[in-house]
Amino acid sequence: RSSLGKGRAMKFRGLTYDREKESYEWVYGMPSYGYETDEIAEIGTVYGDFKEIFPDTLGEQTPYRDKNGKEMYTGDIVALEVDGQVREFVVDKATVDREYNALQGFTGKDGSNTVKVRLADVIIFRWIDTEGIIHQLLPCVDDMGVSDTARMEIIGTAAERGVQESESKGKEQ
């Protein structure tokens, strides 16, 4: 059995279209590649069947839950109040480079009082400001020890917004 982190089973989801119900729905399980392709095309469910998904909707479960206890997946859109305004973030996974101040008395090889680190394959919250600058925020805790993820609320997914936008464009034509 595959596991991720502290003995947690890996879990993914993808958006599928149920022709009988004529609606989109999420399926959960492990991703599977399509025949003769390197693109994820379906999800193998716990029931032993495979459901075809839209590959760009694949999301991986994170170790975080929102303020309502709902599991966060990559691709979720979360809302968080920051500096008196509600901002929307997309949950994602990335490798990020950061520069931190070193502890007092320590200096880097270059003599500076900062250290550069690369954090590989970490969960980030992506936000685009009004000037179009992309920010990649790492999960943090406030002065009271409360995680910002515990104050976030899942308000949708990038995949669902994409489907809604494409359907509304189709109706306009």
Image (tube, helix red, strand yellow):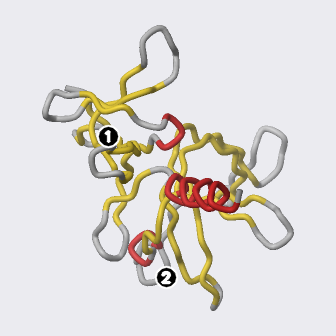
**Amino acid on which the number 2 mark rests in the picture:** Asp
Q: Which circle's residue, 1 or 2, is located before the other in the chain? A: 1
Residue furthest front as drawn: 173
Q: Nearer the viewer, residue 32 or 106?
A: 32
Where in the figure is residue 69, as x and y percent of width and height? 28, 70
Query: In whole angstroms, how far apart are the C-alphas of marks 1 and 2?
Result: 27 Å
Which secondary structure, mark 1? loop
Residue furthest bottom as drawn: 84
In this picture, is 81 found above or below 16? below
- Residue under the point 27% across and 37% down: 29
Dividing the picture into quadrants, the one containing residue 65 is: bottom left
Q: Nearer the viewer, residue 38 or 89?
A: 38
Residue placed under numbered mark 2 in the picture: 143
Relative placement, left or right, of 96 versus 43 is right
- Residue under the point 37% across and 31% down: 52
Which secondary structure, mark 2? loop
**Amino acid on which the number 1 mark rests in the picture:** Gly
- Residue under the point 47% across and 8% down: 36
Disc 1 crowd rating (10 Å Cα; few below 14, some 14-19, many 20+) is few
Residue placed under numbered mark 1 in the picture: 5
Relative placement, left or right, of 25 versus 111 is left
Count of marks placed on residues = 2
Disc 2 crowd rating (10 Å Cα; few below 14, some 14-19, many 20+) is few
Where in the figure is residue 152, as x and y percent of width and height? 45, 74
